[in-house]
């Protein structure tokens, strides 16, 4: 679909592409040059499972600089894209029958990742009249004894909406009542939005210890094919 839409657009057709989420830019030259230099220095062997220490430290610096989040390098795990980070998390925490709450519409892979880990995706519908955003009371009504995690995505794929700090505070107020529920925050689109500011739900201190942030370089640095993602969160997950 993506290839076909590009072909038609190149021929002059007015195409709106709603398929794959990929920036319109190529990877920046300094990144490509650094990769070439790494190859020339034979940095081509197996890395540590959680990623090179230097990369973990760089991610920790990024999280502090951009998101005011403080993590030790040991709390960061590098993965083959953000999708693998999500898969690792749910494979680690879910038992058969456990439920994960998420909002609909949602990114196509969420439900399958949860199902593959033995869990059940509980999708809470949101509509245009709500701004495609989940209300705190709706979240709390969905929580039960089987709820293991809340999968949160802002800025959202596919709706594009961005939660404000006040809206997140309402969700955090509910979640802090349930410290055993893991908040999985997918923030891969943090730098691709056109209104407001991106706020990480992990920045609310009352729920930080039960929150894991998932991010990567694909969207904000136009590096989709490089497959580099990461998670930052509690040590029991890292």
Image: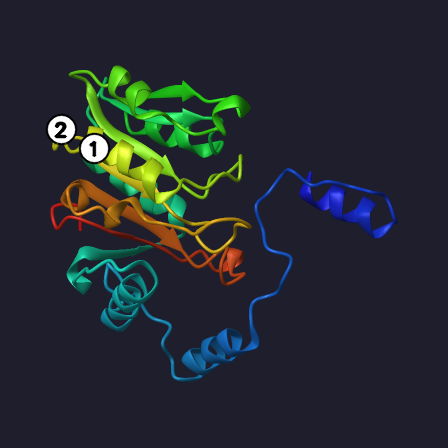
| Closest to the observer, 80 or 185 | 185
Q: In this image, 87 relative to 22: left or right?
A: left
Classify 235 as above or below 101: below
Q: In this image, 32 relative to 26: left or right?
A: left
Residue that badge 2 annotates: 177
From where the camera sits, is residue 164 visible? yes
Classify 225 as above or below 210: below
Assess whether mark 2 and mark 1 are in contact (beta carbons under 8 angstroms).
Answer: yes
* Percent x, y of residue 204: 22, 46
**Of helix, strand and loop, which one carries label 2?**
loop
**Of helix, strand and loop, which one carries label 1?**
helix
Q: In this image, 213 relative to 197: left or right?
A: left
Classify 7 as above or below 145: below
Q: In this image, 11 relative to 123: left or right?
A: right
From where the camera sits, is residue 87 visible? no
Distance of label 1 from label 2 (alpha carbons): 7 Å
Q: How many tags in the picture?
A: 2
* Percent x, y of residue 3: 71, 46
């Amino acid at each position: 679909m993506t290839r076909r839409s590009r072909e038609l657009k190149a021929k002059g057709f007015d195409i709106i592409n709603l398929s794959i989420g990929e920036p319109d830019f190529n990877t920046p030259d300094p990144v490509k040059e650094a990769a070439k230099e790494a190859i020339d220095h034979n940095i081509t062997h197996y890395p540590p499972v959680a990623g090179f220490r230097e990369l973990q430290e760089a991610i920790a610096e990024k999280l502090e600089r951009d998101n005011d989040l403080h993590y030790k390098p040991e709390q960061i795990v590098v993965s083959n894209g953000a999708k693998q980070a999500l898969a690792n998390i749910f494979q680690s925490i879910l038992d058969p029958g456990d439920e994960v709450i998420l909002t609909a519409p949602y990114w196509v892979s969420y439900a399958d990742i949860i199902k593959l880990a033995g869990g059940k995706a509980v999708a809470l519908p949101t509509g245009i009249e709500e701004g495609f955003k989940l209300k705190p009371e709706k979240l709390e009504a969905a929580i039960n004894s089987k709820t293991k995690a809340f999968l949160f995505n802002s800025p959202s794929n596919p709706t594009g909406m961005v939660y404000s700090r006040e809206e997140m505070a309402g969700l955090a107020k509910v979640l802090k009542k349930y410290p055993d529920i893991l908040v999985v925050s997918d923030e891969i689109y943090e730098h691709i939005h056109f209104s407001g500011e991106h706020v990480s739900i992990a920045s609310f201190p009352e729920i930080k210890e039960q929150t894991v942030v998932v991010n990567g370089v694909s969207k904000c640095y136009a590096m989709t094919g490089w497959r580099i993602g990461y998670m930052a969160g509690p040590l029991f997950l890292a």
